[in-house]
Amino acid sequence: MSKILIGPAGSGGSKDEGFILVKNSGLDALEIEFTYGVWMTNEDAKAIHELNKKLNLHLSIHAPYYINLNSTDKNKIESSKKRILKCCEIGNIMGANCIVFHPGYYGKSTHEEAYQTIKKAILEMQKTIEKNKWNTILCPETTGKVSQFGDLDDLLRMMKETGCSICIDFAHLKARYQGKMSYEEMAEKIKKAKLKHVHCHFSGIEWTEKGERRHLLTPESEIKDLFKALKKYKIDCTIINESPSPLEDAIKMKKILSKM
């Protein structure tokens, strides 16, 4: 039987209160959002680590949006790596193992050129993680816009070639492939990759021919379809809800899961 952990993107409250609220809502996980910058101090991370010894939430971090590991400007690549590595440092103190980030944009690069440039950056960051003995793992995320690097097959290949992990955003994939890839097809690919436990994102999604436009509240029918696929292929995962109301939608997902 698959084990599915559920939580929100962000706690919906300030520091301790937010973490306790998530736990008291019957949820299992929480992703700390550093999307507009790493705002947490090392001291705050230590306090969260101590608090979470009692709460036992599965913690992860979403790195800042300002990342492009395929930039033509080498300084921007270095700045991107520093932002991700700062998240790794905080994550190691806090006990958040999975560090999620959007890898970058294709720009004028070919598909393979972008892949190799991003792969090089991931390997370099992994050396720093290993050197510092941080208990964190890089999780590049599947992306929702066709201009962004983050195709599911590319990330599964990246995982095999670098030893990183990945974050599978089911809503992003739906937008990226214009609704042509089913949750069952996604789950089948995950199963074939033999991931022991996969970190995931989910929400409702609106898209155009260019891919993701915006996240929406999570429809009950979509939640049920996703859970059916994950259960069919016995996928162990953590699902972070990224809808405009992540806490409420995560609670809704947990209730639906308990009835299935």
Image (cartoon, helix red, strand yellow):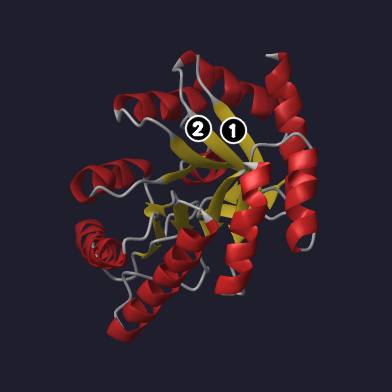
Mark 1 burial class by Cα count in 10 Å: few <14, some 14-19, many 20+: many
In the rendering, at what x and y percent does residue 119 appear? 24, 59
Task: Give the residue at x 67% y 44%.
Answer: 54
Q: Which residue is mark 2?
A: 237
Residue 5's label in the rendered image is: 1
Q: Amino acid at mark 2?
A: Cys
Q: Name above or below for residue 220 compared with residue 148.
A: above
Tell me: 36 left or right of 114.
right
Mark 2 burial class by Cα count in 10 Å: few <14, some 14-19, many 20+: some
Depth check: give the residue in front, 89 or 169. Answer: 89
First in sequence: mark 1 or mark 2? 1
Q: Name above or below for residue 191 compared with residue 86.
A: above
Q: Quadrant location of residue 217?
A: top right
Q: Label 2: state its secondary structure.
A: strand
Q: What whole-number distance in Å separates the C-alpha atoms at marks 1 and 2?
A: 6 Å
Give yes or no for contact between labels 1 and 2 (Cβ–Cβ under 8 Å).
yes
Q: Name above or below for residue 36 compared with residue 245.
A: below
Task: Give the residue at x 76% y 35%.
Answer: 251
Tell me: 130 left or right of 65.
left
In the rendering, at what x and y percent does residue 215 appear? 66, 50
Task: Give the residue at x 37% y 47%.
Answer: 151
Residue 151 appearing in the image: yes
Q: Label 1: state its secondary structure.
A: strand
Depth check: give the residue in front, 4 or 52. Answer: 52
Q: Amino acid at mark 1?
A: Leu
Depth check: give the residue in front, 115 or 99. Answer: 99
Residue 14's label in the rendered image is: none
In the rendering, at what x and y percent does residue 190 appear? 38, 30
In the rendering, at what x and y percent does residue 189 appear? 35, 28
